[in-house]
Image (spheres, rainbow, N blue to C red):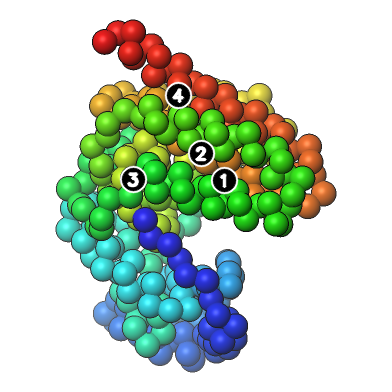
Amino acid sequence: MRVRSKATPEQRAALRAQLARLQQPAALLEILQSSLPAGFEPTEVRCIVPSVHPNRFVLRAGLRSNHGEEHAYALKVYCDDFGRRVWEHSQLLAKHHRPNHSGLCLASRYVPHERMLVFPWVDGPFLSEIVDDRKPELLREAARLAAELHRLPVVPEHLTTAQMFVDETLLQCDHLRSTCPEAAALVEPLTAALQQAATGLDPAAPALVHGDMAPGQFLWTGHGLVLLDLDMFGYADPACDVGHFLGQMERRSVVDPTVRALTPEWLVSFRDAYLATMPHVSQRNVSFYRGLTLVRKISTTCRREPVNWPALVPQLADRARAAFEQAQSDEIASSRLR
């Protein structure tokens, strides 16, 4: 799996300086000039900053001509050459997949000296923000798009095994002991359940995976869903993407009571639509990766909810435990059939 490196203090400082420089219209225009359509002459350049992280940031550049014609771009800048690997992957996917605004959002250009990927800007709400009657059908569409990604004949790197996911999760649990010992005590019993469930997984045909699939990675344009942020791509059991998506929805239902009553229907909508399209993907493995995701999100919850985590973490732990029990009950049912 792709893993973003942690930025050094020097890289963080350089990234901050680059962010300040690129917010200047002249600097943006110089970079985007070769990406503009023929005949388009911008007279106004606008910039906003949607997100900033220690090792990367995203800019939205909007350009307008005297005739009212507008074009917008997303510029994703990294602290190192990580973007080059994403660009190579994006080019490979472009040989197999449909264009942007419906399907995968792929980079259109890489600017090496800026360590920058250039994307067409896509407008619309994230699937995670939609909570009305459209949601079940949009989740089914997201499931079909996930299945389409998993069927692409692309092998981007070496296989990431289930044990590698387990080892990474256990390391995260170890780190939690030093950062939040009270929460670590709640997680400790889950590590045994995690390892036990991992021993009974079904054999899986590996596939190209997104690596960070969640409702917040899908954007609704009004005409179709677009899947964003392919940085964390990998080659693994596709059940890891499905389980991660379901686990993220469950985590949301724990921290946001306003969607709790709706979440069971949403989970079924995505899971059933995906498995209907990809029946060879193991339901047991999906349950396992759902539980693994919930365990991993305990650390995230402790960091993001410093006041509320004592009430939230036990709920996440209960849901993770139920997912592992489901994976093992599926195993028992399968063995009885054999």
Residue 131 vertical placement versus 10 (above, below):
above
For the image shown, how many numbered marks are present on the structure? 4
The amino acid marked with disc number 2 is: Leu
Q: Position of residue 69 (x, y in %)?
A: 41, 72
The residue under the point 47% across, 70% down is 5
Mark 3–mark 4 Cα distance, whole angstroms, equals 17 Å
Residue, disc 2 = 292
User: Dividing the image into 4 quarters, which one contains the C terminus?
Assistant: top left
The mark that comes first in sequence, 3 or 1, is 3
Report whether residue 41 is seen: no
Residue 217 vertical placement versus 8 (above, below):
above
Mark 1–mark 2 Cα distance, whole angstroms, equals 6 Å
Mark number, residue 161: 3
Please tell me whether mark 1 sits on a helix, a strand or a loop: helix
Q: Is residue 251 left or right of residue 44?
A: right
Task: Name the mark nearer the viewer: 3 or 1.
Answer: 3
Mark 4–mark 1 Cα distance, whole angstroms, equals 17 Å
Residue, disc 4 = 327
Please tell me whether mark 3 sits on a helix, a strand or a loop: loop
